[in-house]
Image: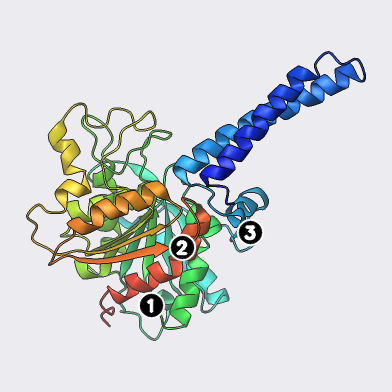
Amino acid sequence: MQPASVWFFVLVSALTLGALVATAWSWNWERFKHIRRALALTLTQLMVVLSVAAGINVQQGFLVTWDDVSTALLGDQGANLNVHPLIAPRGDPANQLDPSVNAAEQVAQRTPGKGVVVATSIRGARTGYTLPVRIYLPAAYFDKSQPQRIFPVLEFITGYHGSLEVYQRTLSADRVMDKLIAQGKMPPMVVVVPEQNPHLPADSECVDAVHGDQADTYVSLDVPDVLRQELRVSHDRSQWTLMGYSTGGFCAVNLAIRHADQFSAAVSLSGYFHAVTDKSTGNLYRGDKAIRLANTPTHTINLPRQYPLNFNLISSSGDREGLRGLKEFAPRIKEPDHLTKTIIGKGGHNFGMWRLALPQAFIWVGKHCEHPAQ
């Protein structure tokens, strides 16, 4: 019996009901009355909370296996918990990333074969936003024998409320990438993790809201512009990929379709494919159905488009909502677009599953990028 099963929810609910009945039945017993009442009330309240959490978990699939529960309670020994990104000083507006590159190069000299994650910020020319980003520069970026090498780019988008630290600390994605590059399973590439929510705690959904935040413009245009201008990265769309988990998965697919002239591929880890509004997003579209449809991949995927796209849709069998969305969206992807679909047999809508999927997702990205020009 797994924690996301209906039977587990039924069991917890039955135990909760039993605790309530036992508390009421023994309430007036005189022996150790006050201590017993306090313990009974505490146990009953804990069981009520547990039954509510179990019900939510059944619907959302956050913790599907007992390994997921163990990781949530005890932490993941494989997570990069003791690593912090290098914090570089901000550069001038014309050369924003120079201090970051210089600082990263100094670290790379001390750690050969390892990429460097830098914490900095990028000011967008179109939006005027100055938002934090994390940039992973592979070891090859600092190879003196190939100073003109051009690198492909992966733009990685976190979920909501995902901190930018997730890329390095929770997913250990930099270490995964270092290993795959060293093994020759993927080419060295630059990764940028942008803040997609200009005014936290509001969830931007990476869209240009009607009379609101212009998150799409910042993530899809402002950030790539700065990277192309200031780093040795490709200007060819074939070497630019979007990837994200949960809300970030929606962002990756939606933005790739909307900006197919900028990106050639998108990877969705447990993403969804409809424009969403709720308390965390606010009224993003203000009743404008056309703009909402323009940010709904199940609608836009079949609209006329000049450039084809590659999609890698990844979910787990325990993530009911993610699996339902994948099965709805995947059949809509037609030639000349290309689809890779992966269903992982364990895990739910959580970091355990995304860590499991990350190596194959990175390898897929590498195969869909042309080799960097020398």
Q: How is the image coloured?
A: rainbow
| Distance in Å between CA atoms under marks 2 and 3 | 30 Å
- Mark 3 is surrounded, within 10 Å at the Cα level, by few (under 14), some (14 to 19) or many (20 or more) other residues, namely few
**Where residue 109 is drawn, which disc sits there?**
none
Measuring 63% from the left and 33% from the top, which residue is drawn there? 14
**Where residue 82 is drawn, which disc sits there?**
3
Res 36 visible: yes
Q: Which residue, given by chain and number where applicable, does mark 1 sit on?
A: 186
Measuring 44% from the left and 78% from the top, which residue is drawn there? 181
| Left or right of residue 288, residue 129 in this image | right
Relative depth, front residue between 219 and 278: 278
Q: Which element carries disc 3, helix, strand or loop? A: loop
Q: Earlier in the sequence, mark 2 or mark 1?
A: 1
Q: Which element carries disc 2, helix, strand or loop? A: loop
Measured as percent of width and height from the top left, residue 323 is found at: 36, 53
Q: In the displayed structure, would residue 60 be above or below residue 363?
A: above
Three-letter code for the amino acid on which mark 1 is drawn: Met
Q: Which residue, given by chain and number where applicable, does mark 2 sit on?
A: 345
Measuring 30% from the left and 79% from the top, which residue is drawn there? 148
Three-letter code for the amino acid on which mark 2 is drawn: Gly
Measured as percent of width and height from the top left, residue 249 is found at: 34, 52
Question: In front: mark 2 or mark 3?
Answer: 2
Res 252 visible: no
Relative depth, front residue between 264 and 118: 264
Measuring 34% from the left and 74% from the top, which residue is drawn there? 366
Measured as percent of width and height from the top left, residue 103 is found at: 49, 64
Q: In the displayed structure, would residue 313 be above or below residue 63?
A: below
- Mark 1 is surrounded, within 10 Å at the Cα level, by few (under 14), some (14 to 19) or many (20 or more) other residues, namely many
